[in-house]
Image (cartoon, rainbow, N blue to C red):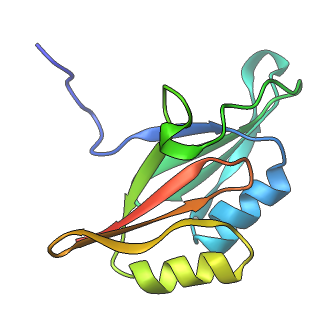
Amino acid sequence: MGVELTKDSIDLGIVIKDPEASLRFYRDTLGFQDAGSNPMPGGGGTMYRLMCGTSMIKLVHPEKEGASPARGGIAGGFGYRYWTISVSNLEALTTAVGDAGYKVRVAPTEIRPGTSISIVEDPDGNWVEFLQA
């Protein structure tokens, strides 16, 4: 049967330690559009909603601090390790992220003819890949 989609994009939840640092990265540096915030059901903290195109990025700041995921990027462990955003300004965006003080883990690199990537790290150590084709 398969999934019967009602939206052409996904919503992604990222559990964060520091809302101000994460909003500075995703909203102010990457330019995601603020879509508001709300308390999590059952007193579970606060969700900050940002739009990346038609995808909603949900930054969740829990009331209680949990364990951090394994470091080391893609090879650091199993599970969700990175996510990809398709862009048209790979070089300029990667430079801007690095100039803002964030770690560039993979500088702009052509991975096959006509397709390049870079990977940066958010304040919690999550990897974000930019892809330009």
Asked if residue 102 lies left or right of residue 61, the reply is left
| Residue name at image x 33 percent, y 45 percent | 9
Quadrant containing the C terminus in the rendered view: bottom left
| Residue farthest to the right, as pictured | 64
Name the foreground residue: 97 vs 20: 97
The answer to which quarter of the image holds residue 5 is top left
The answer to which quarter of the image holds residue 54 is bottom left
| Residue name at image x 79 percent, y 25 percent | 67
Asked if residue 22 lies left or right of residue 74, the reply is right
Quadrant containing the N terminus in the rendered view: top left
User: Can you give x and y, in whole percent of width and height, for residue 14 in the image?
Assistant: 62, 39
Above or below for 70 versus 9 = above
Asked if residue 44 lies left or right of residue 95, the reply is right
| Residue name at image x 81 percent, y 24 percent | 66
The answer to which quarter of the image holds residue 65 is top right
User: Can you give x and y, in whole percent of width and height, for residue 20 in the image?
Assistant: 84, 57
Above or below for 114 versus 11 = below
Name the foreground residue: 57 vs 100: 100
User: Can you give x and y, in whole percent of width and height, for residue 53 in the image?
Assistant: 41, 61
Label count reads: 0
User: Can you give x and y, in whole percent of width and height, for residue 12 in the image?
Assistant: 50, 39
Above or below for 51 versus 18 = below
Asked if residue 26 lies left or right of residue 39, the reply is left
Name the foreground residue: 57 vs 111: 111
| Residue farthest to the left, as pictured | 1
